[in-house]
Amino acid sequence: MKLGIIGLPNVGKSTLFNAITKVGAESANYPFCTIDPNVGIVTVPDPRLDKLGEIYYPKKVVHTSIEFVDIAGLVKGASKGEGLGNKFLSHIREVDAIIHVVRCFEDPNVVHVDGSIGPARDIETIELELIFADLEVLEKRIERVNKQAKSGDKKYLIELEFLEKIKHHLEKNQPIRSMPMDEEWKKYTEQLFLLTSKPLLYCANISEDDLDNPDDNLYVKELKACADQENAGVMIICAKIEEEIAQLDDDEKQLFLQELGLNESGLERLIKVSYRLLGLISILTIGDSEVRAWTIEKGTKAPKAAGRIHSDFERGFIRAEVVTYDDLIKAGSYHAAKERGLLRSEGKDYVMKDGDVTLFRFNV
C-alpha cells in the first residue's frame, strides 16, 4: 500500500510525514521546503502477530508495511506548470490513495500561501488542479478512442460514451470518486490513473490547544462539510504532537497518550483508516520459521490469497485450512484448535476474512 501525503505548502505535511515515518524530512516555514518526494516505509502494528510470536517462538515475526510519500506542496496553477506543477502531479499518479492534509490552526509564525486559513478554499484549490490534470489526460484518451470508434467497433463506441460521461462530470468540478459507476467501469477507470478517482482521506491538522475539543474547531467543521459533499473521510490530528510522540520509547509513548486522553497514536489511527479506505484486510500464517501478516483486498477468495504468498500456491491450490485468530488463541495452539474441531477446510470459493490464520495446501 502506497499513500501519498498532499496539501498546500506550510500545512504540516512534512511534519506529519516525519512523525509517522521517522525519516527526518526537512520541515520549514516557507513554501516548497519539499522539492522531491520523501519516502518512508512503516510496519503495520498488529498485536495479533506479537501474540502468535509468543506462542510459536518463530525465527522471525514479519509485519506487513505501508509506504508513505510526502509530495511537494501544490499551488494554484500547478496543472499549468506553476510551482512544481506536473512534477508534483506525476508523483500523485503513483500512489494507491491520497491523504490530503488541511491546515485547521492559526499560527502567525507559520505563513499561509494565501495569507489566511480557509479549509474550503484550500481544498478547492487542490481539487481543481487535480481535475484540470485529469481533463487533460481524458481529452487525449478521447481523441485516441474517437479515431478507433470510426471503425464502427461497438466496444470503442461504448468506451467513448463512458469517457464523455467522465469528462462531463469533471467539467462540473466534481472528482471522479464521487461519480456512481459499476465495478467493471471502476476497474477501467483505475487503468487511466486519474488523480480524482483515487480514494481520499482529509487530515485536519489542528493545534495542541484544540486537542480536548477538536469538533469545536470551526475550521474542522468547514472541512467536514466539504468532505461530506464528496463522500470523503476525515481524520483529525495534531502533527506537532505526533512529532513529539514519535520521539518517545514505547512506555513513554503510552503514558503521554494517556495524559492526552488518547488510546492510540495518529499513525495507528491513520493505518486503520487507510485499510478501511482501500478495503484491505490481513490474513496470518504461522510456522517455526516465521509468523507473518499478508495484506489482501476484502472479498479475496482463497486461491488468490494463496497467490499473494507465492504464485505456485495459487496455481496448484487444493484447499485452505483456516482457523480464526480468536479461536486459535482460545485453544492455545493450531494443533489444539484442530483437535477441538475449530479448524475448517475451505475450497476455491471461500472468501478470506480478516484475522484468518491459514495454511494453504497446494500441489504443482
Image: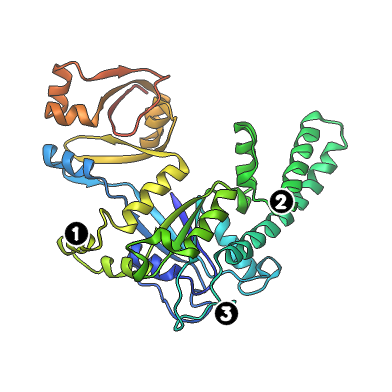
Report the front residue among 281 and 181: 181
Nearer mark to the viewer, of 2 and 3: 3
Report the front residue among 41 and 148: 41
Local SS, label 2 = helix
Q: Quadrant of residue 55?
A: top left
**Compared to 308, does 60 lie above or below?**
below
Task: Tell me which numbered mark, 1 or 2, is placed earlier along the sequence.
Answer: 2
Q: Disc 1 and disc 2: Cα gap in Å?
A: 45 Å
Q: Is residue 41 visible?
A: yes
Task: Tell me which numbered mark, 3 or 1, is placed earlier along the sequence.
Answer: 3
Q: Position of residue 73 (x, y in %)?
A: 54, 70
Report the front residue among 197 and 62: 197
Local SS, label 1 = helix
Please report the residue visible at 26 percent of the width from the left and 41 percent of the height from the top: 292
Callout 3 crowding tier (Cα within 10 Å): few <14, some 14–19, many ≥20:
few
Residue 322: image tag:
none
Mark 2 sits on what residue?
Answer: 170
Please report the residue visible at 37 percent of the width from the left and 66 percent of the height from the top: 210
Mark 3 sits on what residue?
Answer: 115
Q: Quadrant of residue 93?
A: bottom right
Amino acid on which the number 3 mark rests in the picture:
Gly
Direction bottom: furthest residue: 109
Mark 1 sits on what residue?
Answer: 254
Q: Is residue 94 visible?
A: no
Please report the residue visible at 19 percent of the width from the left and 35 percent of the height from the top: 287
Local SS, label 3 = loop
Amino acid on which the number 2 mark rests in the picture:
Leu
Amino acid on which the number 1 mark rests in the picture:
Gln
Marks 2 and 3: CB-CB under 8 Å? no
Q: Disc 2 and disc 3: Cα gap in Å?
A: 29 Å
Q: Position of residue 131 (x, y in %)?
A: 67, 56
Task: Tell me which numbered mark, 2 or 3, is placed earlier along the sequence.
Answer: 3
